[in-house]
Amino acid sequence: MRNTVYCYHDKRYKLKETGTYNVKLCVSINGERNTVSTNIYLTKTDWERINKKSLKEINLTIKRDAIRDIEKKARTILSRLYNPSIEDFLFEYNNEISENPDDHSNDQVKSPLVSLWFQKCMANKKEMGHPYAYYVHFATTLNSLLAFKKNLNFSHLTPVFLAKYRNWYESKGNSASGCDSYLRNIRTVFNYAILHKAVHKNQYPFGKGKCEIGNHAARKKALTIEHIRQLFSLEYSSDSKKDFAKDVFLFQYFSNGMNLLDVSKLKVSNFDKDLCYFMFTRTKTKRSSSNSTPIRVYLRPESRAIIRKWGNKLENGDTYIFPFLNENITDTKKERDKINQERKNINKYLERIGTDLGLSFKLTTGIARHSYASVLNNQNTPIKHIADSMGHENTRTTTIYLDTIDDDKVREMSDKLM
């Protein structure tokens, strides 16, 4: 199949202020087609005139030569690629343009597309075995960026631009911590592009005096030891869905604050033969060489009772402990979708249980992890021990999970001032 490159006039999107349309480079390799925007914009009339042999207008002649240069550069790149693909071509094309100091064309040609490098970075994370949620979060970040500005290039990502993006994002009612998480993803992609020499390190917009990413910790919600005891004593024998939600939450809490994904993936092979302890590696960090130590959990009698009540028949080492997943689900996305649906169902009934407890906040599966850390901290357990039991690399991460001082404690402290 013949591979081709050529420029064409994209008449679908007109710039209202000039009445012009963008000239784009079209690349077709092995039947797969992709387009790249250029810095050249022409009216319909100018596009027709620019292809005539008798062209005399200097400004149109310059644009015609620029178009031919783009096509020539694209053909040169294509000719030197062995067994080319669209991805290989776009990488070489954007890389060559970004490293050409004599190219004074506008940013759309000079700077690689951010969306392309988001996709490359996401693909790399996927190949490295990162959790599906990690991949999805990058995709959500990219969608947010493109909602703020379309056709985004790395040259746009200046400290001023990112400050405007933050203001826009938060003006939509989103949290500062949510924006911080998106900026971290943007920073990761920027570093990835620098590593592959698609962007010069001098363009890096992050750091002191530039775009500084904060650490806006939201007020953490957690159950107290009294809440846990009340929850344990609640009787829902006539409501199996509430009963199941309660027991799942308690199993998480008793199991070092495990998240639901890791609970769902527990198998018989994780347990010792006497069902006294089990070990697991957090899905979130298992691909990290610096933080992949298995976590050892004591299986409390209450947890064993929950397994007997709701668990699968423990046939062999590959049997899942709980009926969230089965061996037929091998696709990461399907696995994640199934667990997200289970989480949604459980949280629906946990919210009702929270009302029964008289909580001022919505009870969810995520609060089990915060509750585990906060209860142990309030019992004066060394924070290093809590960090190790939760699989945290350092205690700074653990402090994020600790409950903030509640309102009664704030008032009690204030009363001591007078």
Image (cartoon, rainbow, N blue to C red):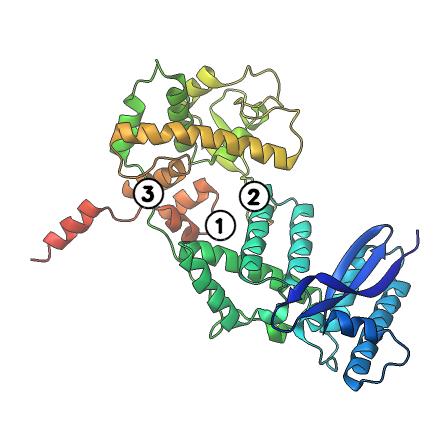
| Residue 370 seen in the figure | yes
Q: CA distance from mark 2 to mark 1?
A: 20 Å
Q: Quadrant of residue 24?
A: bottom right
Q: Amino acid at mark 2?
A: Ala
Which residue in the structure is indicated by mark 1? Answer: 393
- The number of numbered badges drawn on the structure is 3
Q: Under tag 1, what secondary structure?
A: loop
Residue 232: horizontal and vertical position, in percent? 31, 24
Q: Residue at x 89, y 55 (%)?
A: 83
Q: Residue at x 43, y 64 (%)?
A: 167
Q: Residue at x 55, y 57 (%)?
A: 147
The mark nearer the N terminus, 2 or 1, is 2
Q: Are marks 2 and 3 in contact (CB under 8 Å)?
A: no
Q: Residues within 10 Å of mark 3 (few under 14, many from 20)?
A: many
Q: Quadrant of residue 238?
A: top left
Which residue in the structure is indicated by mark 2? Answer: 133
| Residue 262 seen in the figure | no
Q: Amino acid at mark 1?
A: Glu
The mark nearer the N terminus, 2 or 3, is 2
The mark nearer the N terminus, 3 or 1, is 3
Q: Under tag 3, what secondary structure?
A: loop
- Specify the label residue 221 is tagged with: 3
Q: Nearer the viewer, mark 3 or mark 1?
A: 3
Residue 330: horizontal and vertical position, in percent? 67, 31
Q: CA distance from mark 2 to mark 3?
A: 23 Å
Q: CA distance from mark 3 to mark 1?
A: 22 Å
Q: Is residue 85 left or right of residue 234?
A: right
- Rendered position, 305 above or below 112: above
